Image (tube, coloured by chain):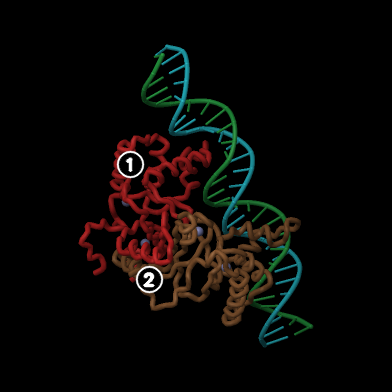
Chain colours: A red, B brown, C cyan, D green
Amino acid sequence: MGAKAGTKAAAPFPAQEHDHGHCATSAMDRAAAICAARGVRLTELRRRVLELVWTSHRPIGAYDILAQLGGPDRPAGPPTVYRALDFLQENGLVHRIASLNAYIGCPDPGHAFAPGIMICEECGRAAELHDSAADNALSRAAAAAGFAITRRTIEMVGRCRDCAAQAA
Amino acid sequence: MGAKAGTKAAAPFPAQEHDHGHCATSAMDRAAAICAARGVRLTELRRRVLELVWTSHRPIGAYDILAQLGGPDRPAGPPTVYRALDFLQENGLVHRIASLNAYIGCPDPGHAFAPGIMICEECGRAAELHDSAADNALSRAAAAAGFAITRRTIEMVGRCRDCAAQAA
DNA sequence: AACCGGTATGATACAGTATTACAGGTCTGA
DNA sequence: TCAGACCTGTAATACTGTATCATACCGGTT
Ligand SMILES: [Zn+2]
Ligand SMILES: [Zn+2]
Ligand SMILES: [Zn+2]
Ligand SMILES: [Zn+2]
């Protein structure tokens, strides 16, 4: 049951045993295309940071990225990674997760509205949730309180389908 | 549509010119009642921290509280205020706002589910939003993705009714 | 080629937020 | 009273993010 989905709605959490190399390379391809279309530069540094974000489906902290950027011998400075992350966020290629102080690659850059983020406390993976019914309900409720939303953050912690199945 | 609300739904943002002393003292009264009912101790330190949180409807940072706890001469240590804030959160008396690293007093302790938080970028005030339709829509959408929510964070930045009226 | 403005990166220092570890104090019930 | 749980103080440290200034790169112009 669950996903009745008239829409294609790519499975939010990928299968446990998937070809993650494909996730990563296709994310890099999409990023290159988007940057080209926007006329912004996906430099070597930004590419490396994005690759590090995409090493798994688990959110990664800025300082974890930092530690892997220059090797243990020649560490980079914090601004280096924060600037790259800012660039990637501005172009919708990564999302920041406020409740974790961490970053996750966006599997579908270009979506208009900020997605909800589901975080599995079992396996540590995070995935996006897009649902117009929930968006609309929230907007309506805020509007009823006289509040006009300009940005929002929705982060959910819980248990993903795979981990629930494994526990049973 | 929107808030059909069979519930009373107190106005989320208080009027600009309200008797805020009343907000604060009634919050302290509710806190005392809740702690008594739960058999936990609302100590002097915890009471002072809660009062500082309630000095306005604007979220306040832990270090702002810290600075006001012992005067500028004898500042308290960070664990002092963090422990008090942890206690207040556990008992539902304050909420943490992840996107601001700040804390806000809960005007209605005891509500079962975590509220959404509306943050006005104009006046800086924050208020809770409770809406069962939005809650349900989000829960349904997550369930459709096979995700079971145990905690959630919903934070909205925008413009409150008062500030919108003032701008017009 | 030499120049130039805009953009990106490097490097250092610092600010802001939160936790760990340990010691000492206070309350409460047996 | 005494033991044990709970609460607070203090110091040190870890984690997260910015400010500042200097240098390097890139693309277009002369
Ligand atoms: Zn993958
Ligand atoms: Zn999981
Ligand atoms: Zn008030
Ligand atoms: Zn406002």
Which chain is indicated by disc 1? A
The percent position of residue A59, horizontal first and vertical second, equals 42, 53
Q: Nearer the viewer, residue D30 or D5?
A: D30
Does residue B82 appear left or right of residue D10 in this picture? Answer: left
Residue B34 position, x and y percent, is 57, 79
Any part of residue A99 in sight: no
Chain containing the residue with disc 2: B
Q: Nearer the viewer, mark 2 or mark 1?
A: 2
- Count of marks, rendered view: 2
Q: Quick one: B58 or A41, which is closer to the camera?
A: B58
| Numbered badge on residue A31 | 1
Residue visible at 69% across and 72% down in the picture:
B44
A108 to B9, vertically: above or below: above
Check disc 2 and give the amino acid type.
Ala
Residue drawn at x 37%, y 34% as measured from the top left: A41
Image quarter of the N terminus of chain B: bottom left
Image coords of residue A58 (percent x, y): 40, 54
Label 1 environment density (alpha carbons within 10 Å; few <14, some 14–19, many ≥20): many
